């Protein structure tokens, strides 16, 4: 099978100006992926399915990934020359910036006809709050239907063009997206025999140690 | 029954055995009633997860729950005496479990089979699993295990039979189903925006009042 770079080049020759980026996986698995822009993702997906050299006719897996906002601290050394002619004074300037987060959907494609794969596609939303639309690939691969519904349910990605976009695991009136990193789960259990970590903090809140007062002295 | 009357009207087991030797059977309505009830506990044919597989195994020839009169798994809650909550109760499933319990006629009994039905088990820290079915319905017997062996289910059934035989049908200590003021309706939780509403039935379950040992 062609490598992901070769597939990217063929996509670019077929769709000039399409936004397709190669995302390398530095790990030993070396399962590289292609980052598609949301505008032309549907056309690229149809090309990948119908191209006689690829014939990626089966989407085995759709996954969501939540990338929250990340604070990036950059330190740059600034040297100010000494007006008296001595050695330049070097100070460290720290700049903090927030890298906005986004939601990512990962598609794993295989070819049943040519027995190769996977080709990994990534799609990213504009942000995590209000611009979470992505084109649905269910019209291209029928097997995406339930998995895109699951990503919609648990991550809150809205797939435009999906034939039946409803929650699939949680109930319809549920408001949250539980697989997001900032999801706050309901505070509905109190007792753990050996609490540690977050559960210990919850246990301290619910039943403080003897003598420290609280709701259950 | 046995007040201060010196020659007790109550017949001893030895006297009863002696009478039985002569072909005379003596019993009380209460004993007969409980004997009949305890030997025909019909479970609801209802399974939730892997514990249900053990429940099915208990009903098959090797473990043979029919030895205890409970082989008739009823497909309708209207005909069932026993709700075996066998498996993980997700929050999406909990209202249906409570509704099934409400549809069962009194007298009815409930087993929480396995770690999940008791407390949420390995999924206790999950957002989508009910932390024990005893938050909504009263549980008679807890069967620990993950999943419990069929023998554990049979042991729970024998324990329930002992409990049924010990119940009175008159007097102050009558069980819930003989009290005219007690209801067999339990509020069914609703699907809320973040969790089930209410998260528990305070008449049935309250959070334990615990004191944490610092450093533990």
Image: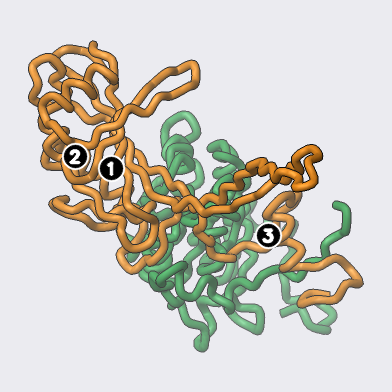
Chain colours: A orange, B green
Residue carrying label 3 = B16
Chain under callout 1: A
Q: Residue furthest front?
A: A84
The C terminus of chain A: image quadrant: bottom right
Quadrant containing the N terminus of chain A in the rendered view = top left
Observer-side mark, 2 or 3, equals 2
Residue depicted at 58% across the width and 56% down the height: B160
Residue pointed to by mark 2: A41
Depth check, mark 1 against mark 3: the one in front is 1
Task: Give how far across and how far down residue A166 sits, in percent.
Answer: 24, 57
Same chain for mark 1 and mark 2? The answer is yes
Name the disc covering residue A147, or none.
1
Q: Residue placed at 81% from the left, 68% from the top? A: A208
Secondary element under disc 3, as helix, strand or loop, is: helix
- Residue A163's spot in the image, x, y percent? 13, 52
Q: Secondary structure at mark 1?
A: helix
Task: Kindly report the distance in space between the C-alpha atoms of the residues bearing marks 1 and 2.
Answer: 17 Å
Residue B101 visible in rendering: no
Is A141 or B100 nearer to us in this picture?
A141
Total labels drawn: 3
Work out whether residue B3 can be spotted: yes
Q: Residue at x 37, y 65 (%)?
A: A174
Q: Foreground: A114 or A127?
A: A127
Name the chain letter of the residue that bears numbered label 2: A
């Amino acid at each position: 099978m062609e490598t992901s770079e070769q597939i990217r080049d063929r996509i670019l020759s077929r769709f000039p100006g399409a936004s397709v980026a190669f995302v390398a996986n530095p790990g030993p698995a070396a399962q590289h992926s292609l980052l598609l822009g949301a505008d032309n993702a549907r056309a690229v997906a149809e090309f990948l399915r119908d191209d006689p050299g690829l014939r990626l006719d089966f989407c085995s897996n759709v996954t969501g990934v939540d990338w929250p906002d990340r604070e990036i601290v950059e330190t740059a050394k600034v040297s100010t020359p000494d007006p008296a002619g001595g050695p330049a004074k070097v100070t460290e300037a720290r700049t903090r910036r927030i890298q906005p987060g986004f939601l990512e959907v990962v598609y794993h494609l295989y070819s049943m006809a040519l027995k190769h794969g996977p080709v990994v596609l990534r799609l990213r939303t504009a942000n995590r709050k209000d611009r979470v639309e992505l084109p649905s690939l269910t019209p291209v691969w029928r097997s995406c239907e339930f998995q895109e519904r699951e990503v919609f349910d648990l991550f809150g990605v809205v797939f435009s063009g999906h034939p039946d976009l409803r929650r699939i695991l949680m109930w319809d009136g549920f408001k949250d997206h539980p697989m997001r990193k900032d999801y706050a789960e309901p505070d509905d259990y109190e007792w753990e025999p050996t609490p540690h970590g977050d559960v210990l903090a919850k246990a301290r809140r619910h039943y403080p140690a003897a003598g420290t007062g609280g709701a259950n002295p | 029954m046995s007040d201060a009357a010196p020659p007790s009207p109550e017949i001893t087991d030895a006297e009863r055995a002696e009478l039985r030797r002569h072909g005379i059977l003596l019993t009380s309505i209460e004993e007969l009633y409980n004997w009949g009830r305890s030997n025909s506990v019909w479970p609801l044919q209802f399974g939730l997860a892997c514990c249900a597989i053990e429940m099915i195994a208990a009903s098959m020839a090797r473990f043979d729950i029919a030895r205890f009169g409970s082989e008739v798994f009823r497909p309708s809650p209207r005909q069932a005496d026993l709700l075996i909550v066998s498996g993980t109760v997700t929050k999406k499933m909990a209202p249906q479990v409570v509704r099934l319990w409400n549809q069962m006629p009194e007298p009815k009994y409930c087993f929480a089979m396995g770690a999940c039905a008791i407390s949420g088990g390995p999924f206790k820290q999950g957002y989508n699993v009910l932390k024990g079915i005893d938050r909504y319905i009263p549980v008679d017997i807890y069967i620990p295990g993950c999943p419990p062996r069929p023998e554990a289910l049979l042991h729970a059934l024998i324990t329930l039979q002992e409990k049924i035989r010990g119940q009175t049908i008159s007097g102050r200590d009558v069980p819930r189903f003989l009290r005219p003021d007690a209801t067999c309706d339990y509020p069914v939780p609703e699907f809320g925006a973040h969790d089930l509403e209410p998260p528990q039935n305070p008449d049935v379950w309250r959070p334990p009042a615990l004191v944490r040992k610092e450093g533990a």
